[in-house]
Image (cartoon, helix red, strand yellow):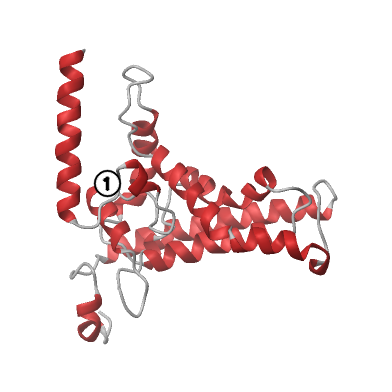
Amino acid sequence: MSPWSKNLSRFKMNPSYPSWSQMRHDAFYTTLASFIASCIEIALCHFWANKQMGLSSPLAEVTYSVLVQGTTLTYWRNVHFYVIHRLMHPWRINILGNFDPGYYLYKFAHSLHHKSSNPTAFSGTSMHPVEASLYYSAALIPFLFFSTPIHPIIPLSAILDCGVAAWLGHDGFQWPGSGDYFHLLHHQYFDCNYGTPIVPLDYCLGTFASCKSDVKKMNTTRQVQRTSNDKQS
């Protein structure tokens, strides 16, 4: 136990501390996820070095392009996070009959991340290799939505943002860390707060919960909708 645990206890969002088994589990998988992120970076550097992919350099020649991509990075990166995260939870929509791709993605991949019910910084990228690959694929977004060639600082900054944002957001403390209370609710209740408040997709799509009572309201609404759908079918 940390010698500062008593002094910081009032800032901890979950008053209890995770077990050492969870810490070891999270440390292993977050290291594996970081290795996968490094592989994406190595692949990009390989393509750039062999001129198989457009490379804009030096930085001074692409100031405007880099400025636009860099200042919007957090926003498009968080949209990407919401989409891949939402896809890895049950979809709860009847478009493929009884087959729910989100259920299986959660069962075989994303459930590993949710074993961290009491998150720490190690929990941020404690992910199944499939999820880690999808998560860090945010580095590829500039090649899809921005004109090429792309300066290396943009995709590499996206990788860095993925890692640091997840580690800080899961640290479990409101101060001196930057734990995300809304994401803590997601770890506790699963079906809410798939994204981040900086891009209000949860609010727009009805999955935002600011407190535990909001989660109860959402569950009640879902139950009413299921009952209505069952009657119609």
Report whether residue 156 is seen. no
Report whether residue 228 is seen. yes
Give x and y (percent) for residue 211.
20, 57
* Residue assigned mark 1: 190
Residue drawn at (75%, 59%), measured in percent from left and top? 151
Residue drawn at (36%, 51%), measured in percent from left and top? 113
Drawn side of residue 223 relative to residue 3, left or right: left
Secondary-structure class at tag 1: loop
- Quarter holding residue 123: bottom left
Q: Residues within 10 Å of mark 1 (few under 14, many from 20)?
A: some
Is 15 rendered above or below residue 113? below
- Please tell me which residue lies in front, 176 or 66: 66
Residue drawn at (28%, 47%), measured in percent from left and top? 192
- Quarter holding residue 191: top left
Give x and y (percent) for residue 216.
15, 46
Q: How many marks?
A: 1
- Quarter holding residue 26: bottom left
- Please tell me which residue lies in front, 125 or 82: 82
Is 15 rendered above or below residue 33? below
- Please tell me which residue lies in front, 178 or 69: 69
Residue drawn at (45%, 59%), measured in percent from left and top? 30
Position of the N terminus, as image quadrant, is: bottom left
Q: Give the residue at the far top of this rendering.
A: 233
- The amino acid sitting under disc 1 is Phe
Position of the C terminus, as image quadrant, is: top left
Give x and y (percent) for residue 119.
31, 62
Drawn side of residue 130 relative to residue 42, left or right: left
Drawn side of residue 155 relative to residue 25, left or right: right
